[in-house]
Image (cartoon, rainbow, N blue to C red):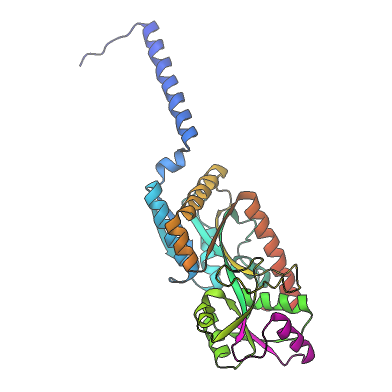
């Protein structure tokens, strides 16, 4: 094909037109939320610092499936358990801050740094994205127990200092810390009995080897339904829909008390703000899908969807609360 030489005036008009089209295209992409990151990234890795099958893993997989379907992206789950979630969290902190790697976090994200020196800081090594879900803790006794209310249990503990026991997973776990917070709020002396997990702690209560248990609602729901255990109080700020007649600890006279499990999403520090915002939009939208929400609730996970600065404030407050409780109870890393 021969080269065609255009007159200078016509060439300048064509060049200007091409530039205008480029600007319009960029503007449309910006308005529609399709920035360069979302156009070019086809795979996002969700690091889960827990073993497969747990609530954090189930949460990650449910949301990943929905986001993949809605956005046409490939979401990869990478389970990296070990050292009480430290291994996976540290690995995520070293990932490139490009939006291709995010981390599902839970209470241990803020507890571990209060127990020992780590190679990351939860408040500065990550960008907070969203507070995804919360879960409920329950204080329960055996159905044969004489204690019918939290006040009954705590009054008995005051009358017999150190004699009554409360079991949970532990030591230095979320429920152990929540138990120590309750002891201080109520000014009672109860003996903590640690077990290697929630289920062994509940089994000990079923066998009447301990006075009470502090555990997740999901762990005891079947025993409560069967009438084998009795729930005395809900540790969350609000009651559980499935147990409408069980008061919260706050309603039982300790108005500032609150303890619950939670899961959030963070990215490596210095991930661009627009990328963090887009990720927040995807994950919160996924949780609002009725089918996804229903599956989460079955797992005892209640969607929250608080993002950005509000989630950052939540992390700071919980970090300080855990640190205070750990120091006051002299809790040591296992």
Q: Farthest residue in the front direction?
A: 245
Query: Which segment did they paint magenta?
Result: 140-168
Residue at left offset 32%, top offset 8%:
6
Image coordinates for residue 191, horizontal then vertical, percent? 70, 88
Give the residue displayed 54% in from the left and 87% down from the top: 228
Position of 77 relative to 189 (above/below): above
Classify the position of the C terminus by image quarter.
Answer: bottom right
Q: Quadrant of residue 133?
A: bottom right
**Total residue callouts:** 0
Residue placed most toward the observer, 79 or 238: 238
Nearer the observer, 87 or 209:
209
- Quarter of the image with the N terminus in it: top left
Q: Is residue 317 left or right of residue 167?
A: right
Q: Quadrant of residue 206?
A: bottom right
Q: Residue furthest left?
A: 1
Residue 63 seen in the figure: no
Residue 176 position in % (x across, y down): 65, 78
The picture places residue 17, in percent across and down from the top left corner, at 41, 16
- 100 is within the stretch colored magenta: no
- Residue 106: x and y in percent read 57, 66
Relative to residue 35, is residue 105 drawn left or right?
right
Q: Is residue 217 visible?
A: yes
Relative to 230, residue 73 above or below: above
Q: Which image quadrant is residue 115 in? A: bottom right
The verdict on residue 145 being magenta is yes
């Amino acid at each position: 094909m021969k080269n065609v030489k255009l007159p200078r005036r016509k060439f300048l008009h064509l060049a200007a037109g091409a530039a205008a089209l480029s600007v319009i295209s960029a503007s449309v992409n910006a308005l529609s939320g399709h920035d360069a990151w979302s156009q070019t990234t086809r795979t996002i890795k969700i690091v889960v610092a827990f073993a497969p099958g747990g609530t954090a893993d189930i949460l990650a997989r449910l949301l990943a499936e929905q986001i993949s379907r809605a956005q046409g992206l490939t979401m990869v789950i990478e389970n990296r358990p070990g050292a009480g979630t430290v291994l996976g969290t540290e690995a995520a902190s070293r990932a490139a801050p490009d939006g291709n790697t995010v981390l599902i976090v839970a209470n241990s994200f803020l507890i571990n740094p209060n127990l020992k020196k780590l190679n990351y800081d939860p408040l500065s090594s990550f960008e907070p994205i969203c507070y995804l879900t919360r879960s409920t803790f329950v204080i329960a006794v055996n159905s044969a127990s004489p204690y019918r209310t939290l006040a009954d249990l705590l009054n008995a503990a005051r009358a017999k200092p150190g004699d009554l026991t409360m079991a949970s997973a532990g030591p230095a776990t979320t429920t152990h810390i929540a138990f120590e917070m309750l002891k201080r709020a109520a000014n009672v002396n109860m003996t903590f009995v640690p077990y290697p997990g929630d289920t062994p702690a509940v089994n000990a209560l079923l066998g009447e080897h301990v006075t009470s248990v502090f555990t997740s609602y999901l762990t005891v729901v079947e025993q409560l339904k069967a009438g084998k255990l009795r729930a005395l109080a809900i540790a969350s700020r609000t009651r559980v829909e499935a147990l409408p007649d069980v008061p919260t600890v706050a309603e039982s006279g300790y108005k500032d008390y609150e303890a619950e499990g939670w899961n959030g999403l963070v990215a490596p520090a210095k991930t661009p703000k627009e990328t963090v915002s887009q990720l927040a939009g995807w994950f919160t939208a996924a949780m609002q899908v009725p089918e996804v929400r229903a599956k989460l609730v079955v797992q005892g996970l209640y969607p929250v969807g608080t993002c950005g600065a509000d989630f950052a404030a939540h992390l700071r407050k919980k970090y300080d609360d855990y640190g205070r409780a750990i120091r006051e109870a002299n809790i040591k890393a296992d």
